[in-house]
Amino acid sequence: MAAVDRFEGVDMGKSRKLLGTPIALPAMLLGGPGVALTVPGVRTASYIAGSLWDGLLQRVSDDRQRRSPSLSAKLAAKVAADEAARTLMLGMAHFPSRSQRARIREELSSALVLWEENGWLSDARAFHRTPPPLTRPRIERRQVGGLDFEHISFKSLYRPRSEEPGGDRWLSMEPNRTAHAWMLRHADPDRAWIVCIPGFRMGHPRIDLHGLSAARFHHERGLNVLIPVLPLHGPRTVGKRSGDGFITADVLNTVHAEAQAMWDMRRMIGWVRGLGASALGVYGVSLGGYNTALLAGLEPDLDCAVAGIPATCLSTLLRLHAPRPLLWLGERAGICMDMLQSVLQVVSPLAVAPQLPRERRFIFAGLADRLIPTHQVHQLYEHWDRPRTAWYEGTHLSFVWEDVVHRLLDEALGAGGMLSHAVTPQDEDFEAIQYALANRAA
């Protein structure tokens, strides 16, 4: 029995919206201005209140008593961390000027015509060109937090096609034209490699190496580890913060960022294979999960792919998390969500079929994730033909500490032949819990 066979049950998200907010708002009003300014706390209270109602609905609607996350101080702290991150990202939102909004609208219209003329809306793989081989990257030895690693860099050579809107602007971002990655490797060249793709706003070695469990993969599992830095992140940043400009209303920048991410990572993978890699898998979280799924549809011969807490539709995330005034300004400028979604189709993981077998595809996600809605995970689950999927009782940021995530990663490595011996699939109790959690996620 697979860890997840289906999604079913009551739509719990609606009850949180209907009940959670009315219960949370009086607490905000009674608490005065100090509480009113604490948006993450209010939204956390809304989540907890809605979850209590969900539990009642669950008991009334299902005699089987499906397992659901236990409400606790620990879960509340996880939810609050997600809400704080969401509020921080909202505060970083860029509001384009009137002239910029007009330019964005014109670029979107031109891109749609170009995509249609070339057939890329129906064949997204054709949009992505095969990059040239990477031969001699620059390699520097570095250390952070007591962990030795290598910093590789090379000229990306990515250039949007001359007819693609926004191409000249993209190429003017000089720091982004050099690709970077962090690397941990053993002395023998024929080890298996895991490519770990960071999430949005990551891109710094201390954060990436810890957040993606690089030491565990390297020291405990005996793997070589490669962590690419996404465009506009870390040393490739062109704004004030890592990731500025990657996911914004300037949608053609997002298209170019994703296309370049695929280009750079495929060059790195080719270089790693040339070193004698015995096997190669890909694992990413959040935006990295999105890129893992997209890469799995472009790069042949991957031995496993693990999409963690994955986004699947960037236009939907923009609608969900962008400040309401920004969405209103876009609508006034004639920028509609359908247009955004169509333009982003060429870099959507849902527009490319995975190139590796179902038994080597894996997904994990948090039931209380406040940044990536569970329906986006469900979309990838269906698109990937319902692969082995683990749900944990936590949030977007808590994946680092969730035991079920590490167990699934070991299983994926075993399925890909990347360990000295395959990891035994989880026992029946784990299977039953995962099945119940999948139902709870519906």
Image (cartoon, rainbow, N blue to C red):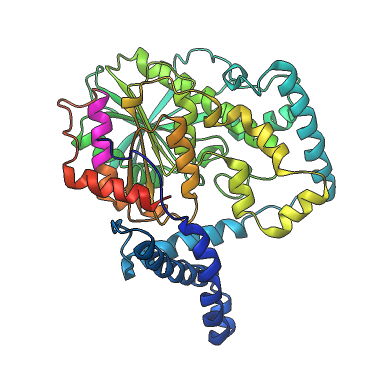
Classify the position of the N terminus by image quarter. Answer: top left
Where on the picture, by quarter, is residue 272?
A: top left
Q: What residue is drawn where x is 45% and y is 34%?
A: 382
Give whichever of 236, 112 is nearer the camera: 112
Q: Is residue 33 above or below residue 328?
A: below
The verdict on residue 296 being magenta is: no
Residue 72 image point, x, y percent: 32, 69
Q: Is residue 354 left or right of residue 101?
A: left
Residue 433 image point, x, y percent: 25, 49
The answer to whether one can see residue 386 in this image is yes
Mainly helix, strand or loop, the magenta region? Answer: helix
Q: Is residue 139 above or below residue 40?
A: above
Q: Is residue 17 above or below residue 397?
A: below
Question: Which region is colored magenta?
Answer: 407-416
Where on the picture, by quarter, is residue 222?
A: top left
Q: Is residue 235 left or right of residue 238?
A: left
Q: Is residue 68 left or right of residue 107?
A: left
The verdict on residue 415 being magenta is: yes
